[in-house]
Amino acid sequence: MSSLIFTRSFRSSSSLVLSAFLLISPVFAASDDHVDIPVAEDVVQIEKVEVAENGISRANNVLQATDVAPTSEAGSTPLLLLNRLPGINVNSSNTYGIRTSDGNSLRLRAFSLNALALTVDGVPTPYNPALAGSSNPNRFLDGENLAGIEVSPGTGDVSAPSYSALGGSINFYTRGPARQAGTELVGAYGTGNLHREFIRVDTGELTPGVTAFVSGSNVEQFDSFGHTATNKRKEIDTKVRLETSTLTLVGSYTYSNADDHDDRTVSGAYYGQWVPYAPVTATGGAAAGTLGQTGDLTDKGRNWYYSAVQDGNPNGLDSVYWNKNVNQRGQDLFSVNATFSPLPDLKVTAIPYFQDVNGHNYGAVPNKTALTFFANAQLAYYLQTGGFRTDIVAPTNTNAAFDAPTFLNTYVNDTPAQRTALINATTVLPGAGDEARRSVNSGHRYGLPLNLSWEVGSERIDVGGYFEHDVENQTRKGYNLVNGLIANDFISNQSWTTYSDNHFNVHTYTFYAKDTVQLLENRLHLSAGLKGLQQNVVYNGAPDNLAFYNVYAGGYYRTKFSFSDSFQPQLGATYGLNRGNELFFNFSRNFAAPGYDVIGSTSFQQNPGGLKPERTNNYDLGWRTSRKDWSASLATYYIEYQNRIGSIAPYDPLGFGSASTTTPYANLGRVTGYGAEAAFAYRPARSFRLGGSLSYQSLTYGDNYQQPGSNGLPQTVAIKGNTVPNTPKWTFNSDATYFFGSFFAGVNARFTDWVYLSTDNGLAGGNGAQRLPSYALFGLGVGYDGIARQGALKNVRIALNVDNVFDRYWYYSAGGNSYGNGSFGVGLPRTTYLTVSTKF
């Protein structure tokens, strides 16, 4: 990939946008704890990070936005760009990160987003999948404002502000205000009726040392493979910078708002079952051959998303119901990055921040399902109190002759089988659509990462900490609709159940200290660090319908938990063999507090002491080299993952059905992993660049685990020795670009090996459907860049990007559980995007 950097500075081109395509690959930089993200000369960086002559002890990889510009769409989600780096596998059903969930499938070695330390310009952005207000990095920046991404696989620095850094860190850096006044305009149009507009205005120096910019974007595109539902996203970013000889202040504000539609995954049981669509029969039931799926599996699953075909009622998936499968996410983020250097060798950094989040999501619910929820909510309350709830009502789509009191008196005295029969025997209003549910999310958080760095001769000392207070709320209820029609509004005072009502109040404290010394004429660097974590959680809520039975009348848990580990050591060493070659080694022990999805589950609330926090031991050993025309890096690693928390099969003694219960969690034992990652870059001439990465990994379960059987008694699930799902053994990525003056052409190739979808590896019952095939994808970018190459049209850039050039069918793992079918997403077909940019 691009050259290894062993110098203290990097000179980049003078353009503001997509400038100087130095090498089409990541940069592997050398630094004691951070890397310098090169940006244009007239751009003021948020923080001047010192880059030491010798390297860091971790397998750090750095991707610069300019490096991959010819083969990636301007403004695309930064998470997708990470596929260029070794050890990372990420997919999305949307190129531009319109959905909050886009890129959530990311895996860095053995770990997903919620197990990594994530920051944007030093502000922690933890990913909590349980909450719709979750801080996915897509929400914090536009692609045009991205300067670079630093990835530390396996081991993030001890200073990383996080409570879940089991597998390393990903740090996003944005472009600061420019010293020269200017304006950028970007417009894009493409597949799926995409239109996207971006504008950025830099003020230049308003007064000596004061610069600012404001930018905004608007993007709309049809849902994946569809032509009905439109996804929308708006973003506003602004920064103001004040710089003096000893103090730098950067105030930032980010606003984002997305209205998107559910990204529907497919059960692994359906892979390969590409049967023609079976129409609804005259009696209203689905014809044979549909496998029970609620969607269209023609064209190998590409019609699954909001099919225009009526695939049966009730199911809530065909195109007439898309307006009740909507997600809205909004946020405001304020931060100040303050760096104070009272002495040349002393630097103090503080980054106070405040974030407000809000959102909601809708979902269509079949009539029979809504009635089941209502009946089970009443049953749970009746078994506890002997009476019925008055705060919920029966679904309105049930027949006018429906007598709720008589129905409930029968229901609570029936057996589970009789209850199911009673539900099925209840008719609905002729012509009525489905019911619907609505989740409302709100919350805020504020915090302060602090760091003090002091260099004394050949020694450097870093001390600091991180504080955060996070308040998150999520309430999900089912509602009747005006006139019983799916397209109409909710009747807010007619709820037929409360799915869940979760409230979290979390305080997190971390501290760290690290000492780095240079020996043997600065050829040997040794570092030792220590990190501690304390997290206090107050939970108030009802995780599911069962809570009304498991607790008491009223159904709410009010609990407090503390998770702590004051000894998380980190050791590292680098040794310079000669001017261009370096060896590195690193060890770290990491700890993670349980996620909000785990805490907000009935199984955890009932037995919190039965769940141990997760831990990992990570080892890295590698070599880097840098030559005149090429550079390379090779890293090997070993992972010990302990007390892995995963989902298990729910036990439902009341026969409520899995939809009425939260996912139960348990410690499922150990995972061990090892692998190797290679990267290279070759630039024989200024006009031609070639880069690539190759990764191999092996992840296996070290233990079997137990879960409840159908009778409630423990049963052993044999997975010891199996491969962890979504673990491709081999991945490869390469970019090549050639310039003809101001014209360019680039090609990207990506290969991902086959993966398992379930923990049983598809062996149970010989279910081969649980294995997704490998795929190879090619992308093409051609265009003219007068901005970066100083062409005749020096203020214009025009690019045409084509992804999946050969229109291959491909599929990616989208998550699953430990007890059944995994799920997969259908990869995008050939997509084409035209982007026009100008700067003046």
Image (spheres, rainbow, N blue to C red):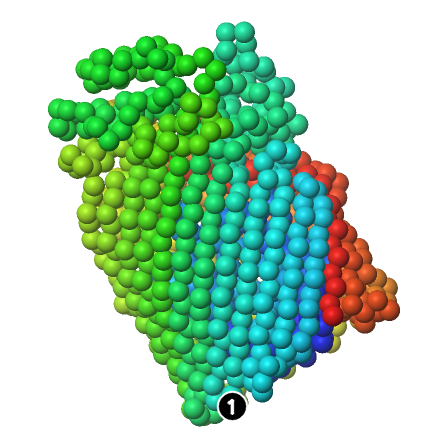
Residue at point 32%, 10% (across, down): 401
User: Which part of the image, by quadrant, shows the N terminus?
Assistant: bottom right
Question: Residue 215 placed where, x, y %?
Answer: 60, 64
Nearest the eye: 166 or 429: 429
Residue at point 62%, 39% (across, down): 222
Nearest the eye: 486 or 446: 486
Q: Which residue is mark 1?
A: 245
**SS at mark 1?**
loop
View extreme (front): residue: 483
Taking 514 as reference, is 690 above or below it?
A: above
Nearest the eye: 364 or 214: 214
Amino acid type assigned to the residue bearing label 1 in the image = Ser
Taking 43 as reference, is 264 above or below it?
A: above
Let me know if residue 350 appears in the view: yes
Taking 474 as reference, is 498 above or below it?
A: above
Q: How many marks?
A: 1
Taking 711 as reference, is 281 above or below it?
A: above
Residue at point 47%, 92% (across, down): 344
View extreme (left): residue: 386
Question: Residue 822 placed where, x, y %?
Answer: 47, 35
Let me know if residue 767 appears in the view: no
Q: Is residue 823 left or right of residue 665?
A: right
Q: Is residue 124 left or right of residue 64?
A: left
Report crowding for label 1: few under 14, some 14 to 19, many 20 or more residues within 10 A (C-alpha). few
Question: Residue 21 placed where, x, y %?
Answer: 73, 67
